[in-house]
Image: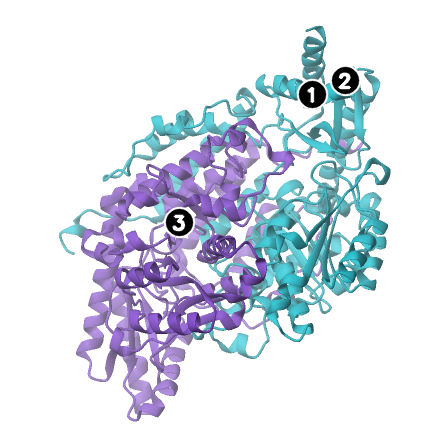
Chain colours: A purple, B cyan
Amino acid sequence: MASESRKPFLPLDPMSFTKESKAVIDFIADYYKNIEEYPVQSRVEPGYLSASLPESAPYCPESLEDILKDVNDCIIPGLTHWQSPNFFAYFHANASTAGFLGEMLCSGFNVVGFNWISSPAATELESIVLDWMGKMLKLPSSFLFSETGGGVLHGSTCEAAVCTLAAARDKALKELDGNWENITKLVVYALDQTHFTFQKAAKLVGIPPSNFRIVETSFSTGFSISPEKARFAIEADIRSGLVPLFLCATIGTTPSGAVDPIAELGKVAREYKLWLHIDAAYAGSACICPELRHYLDGVELANSISMNPHKWFLINMDCCCLWIKEPKLLVDSLSTDPEILRNNASKFKAVVDYKDWQVVLSRRFRALKLWIVIRRHGLANLMHHIRSDIGMAKRFEAFVAKDDRFEIVVPRKFALVCFRLKPKKEAEGTELNCKLLDAINSSGRAFMTHAIVGRIYVIRCAIGTTLTEEHHVDALWKLIQEKAQNLLME
Amino acid sequence: MASESRKPFLPLDPMSFTKESKAVIDFIADYYKNIEEYPVQSRVEPGYLSASLPESAPYCPESLEDILKDVNDCIIPGLTHWQSPNFFAYFHANASTAGFLGEMLCSGFNVVGFNWISSPAATELESIVLDWMGKMLKLPSSFLFSETGGGVLHGSTCEAAVCTLAAARDKALKELDGNWENITKLVVYALDQTHFTFQKAAKLVGIPPSNFRIVETSFSTGFSISPEKARFAIEADIRSGLVPLFLCATIGTTPSGAVDPIAELGKVAREYKLWLHIDAAYAGSACICPELRHYLDGVELANSISMNPHKWFLINMDCCCLWIKEPKLLVDSLSTDPEILRNNASKFKAVVDYKDWQVVLSRRFRALKLWIVIRRHGLANLMHHIRSDIGMAKRFEAFVAKDDRFEIVVPRKFALVCFRLKPKKEAEGTELNCKLLDAINSSGRAFMTHAIVGRIYVIRCAIGTTLTEEHHVDALWKLIQEKAQNLLME
């Protein structure tokens, strides 16, 4: 050992930690300053990076300068710039200074809070902040720790879906005489606008793919699920000897931002004893504004609800809130009690052990960033953030509505506008708008994506990156008009 | 809008980003400087934090100073200090400056690389770094992208377990005429020292809990799985009409650091067509050293292997490498093809879309930290890091061996030492060592945890936090002797 330790190897020395970390802070700040100079969607070709990097790891250390030079020369060109104010694709992933500070503290402390004892603050702050968040959304207190419910931070909606589906599955199997063979009888219901992650999650937990019912939506219901259709599907399954298990309703669907009628679906779920989960991944954040809270009406009938603050709530990736009315069901399904983690606090059930509320054992201290974002901005500014984005979406919607060449395809509810260039013949609609979208994106000046709703190809303009201001929306509209003009002249 | 926008709300302004981030860097550096002053295991009581924080979120913004004061006064006392050099519990979670820099860049760019097109650099760097890592471990090229295999970064072993189990399950169900009812016939094998996460994962993917076979280990096999016992269990299941599916072998078990005989188990798995997964979560990192690589002998017979660089490879949480020989099986099981994500690169199969290799859709750019840690240190220093920890573990082991009052219970292979204070009567062993462990941990000067191996309660001394030096190990031994002396005098 003596000979090897001659070279000092100090991978966490506070002096160099400070110096190198501050150099990276400056690098990131420069990135934000220059972000509008990059094409929003990366223009690299598949396989571009392997030409720039060696085939295997270096034997000797390299300098931070060399690494940052490569980040600049090789990585940044291959990024699609999700933080660009001209990013209007998918749903945005809001970064913020406060969210970043929370991530730094999380990574700096680097504790692993799988159970209470392994870092009590990680568990307790998470429970407290989930109650804060639940109160901001005016969730019924039955979802909060202050009563008999509770919340947990997952990384993504899919993890929340897997966990709630597993809890619902195991509850049902227990009620069906504990016979695991009944797993093939369980049926999950969603609509064609439900996030595909629920279909993946249902298959993951062992529900036969043929037992995943996709209820079709249409213009007539504003692309939300119709309670009658859901009831019809459920009754057909019961007649076939199947067991309806789980119904997923959405606040702000990914394709069009539609909202399912929670209260009516809740009645259907109660009637047939289905687990009702509400996926508010995107639009949940908006429901902190009193004027938008009505979209959550009926949530008291749900068993669980999830939303992603990493989308629209200024929280850096990743962060998904899941609340559940009966955490016991989650714990019954997911708990493990290995000798190696036994401790008195857990034994006497005095504490929450979050490992039993999620898929994974290891967990980051995500609550820090949610706590810091909420405190640093306060409810007032968080509402302002949502309203400002919705205001910009209204402005964009008005631009589209005023131009006869275009049409709004789905009525806007939040900050997502689904529109298209009107085709001369309906059959040409997809090709025309595909071309338009491609022209816009390949300009590098903006990035949007598409969806198909009611068989119509629409361009989605999702407004809401942290840096987007009114003039970016105005420039986007000019760009769209310019590219549309070119297309129509062809 | 006009009235609301009077107050400037700039949650990602580069100026304040820089200023506030640097303040937090200084805060974290101070934390590292002072880390030895805190009791390693938190001493708070359940519910401690709710007394210090308000019941609901603030309406108005608060200053960073106030927030950092609360982190200092309310959060730090509730942390168990995983980065303390006196942390010898569970397995360590190595933070490092380089890992932190990677986390900062990941959080700063805040891209979501669910498919190639959404940020090509995120996907390509991950594939390249997984090949680097695979080569460092001298994995057969059949696990690398450079041939027909490939790797992916998950957050944790449990996610890797869920995904490989789902892939194995779906392959088997397809071979069994595609009838989903056969899910109740599938059997998973592990040993009593296998990480409990595999049992959780098997249940999660719908394998009946009664079909999870736990093969008992004993002193005679060094607490590793015996191929004969595995074969016996498999044949009994076949006779009962069940279908052996999956066998998990471990390199460095959690209780004792045992290593299963991979080559022999591989032969059994081949013979009965089981999916062999190797869980090298802890000790995989050590196998970059040529003198330890032999523990991986036989890996060519496995279908998949996972290891956690966030444990012992200087990577801040969270990071789990999973390699698989036939990525197609993972994709067949986990892929989704929603309209909203369709793009030409994916359509023509020219690229990897990592959303189809994992549970979740949203994913952080974790490859950055792995890439930066490897480059910043180089293979040379990374091997030094492992060898230095093993050297310290040998030193500790020698202390224990020299003291007649103590015994080493399991032969040490890596940097985990399982020992105990010898009881006068065997029946008193658990209580005596429980008391000893409690006395050590409640001193605040060190933190270890326990395990039960071969029905014996052992104290686990896991050496390997980034900041641990020889003098910390020496002080730990003195502390143990002092507390043992007190106990024996009682």
Residue labelled with disc 3: A321
Q: Chain of mark 3?
A: A
Residue labelled with disc 1: B433
Q: Which quadrant holds the C terminus of chain B? A: top right
Q: CA distance from mark 3 to mark 1?
A: 40 Å
Q: Amino acid at mark 1?
A: Asn
In percent of width and height, residue B65 lies at 34, 31
Residues marked 3 and 1 touching at CB (< 8 Å):
no
Q: Amino acid at mark 3?
A: Cys
Would you call the spot at circle 3 few (<14 residues within 10 Å), some (14-19), or many (20 or more)?
many
Q: CA distance from mark 2 to mark 1?
A: 8 Å
Tags 3 and 1 on a common chain: no
Residue in front for this viewpoint, B90 or B213: B213
Q: Is residue B436 left or right of residue A374?
A: right
Q: Amino acid at mark 2?
A: Pro
Residue B423: which numbered mark, if any? 2
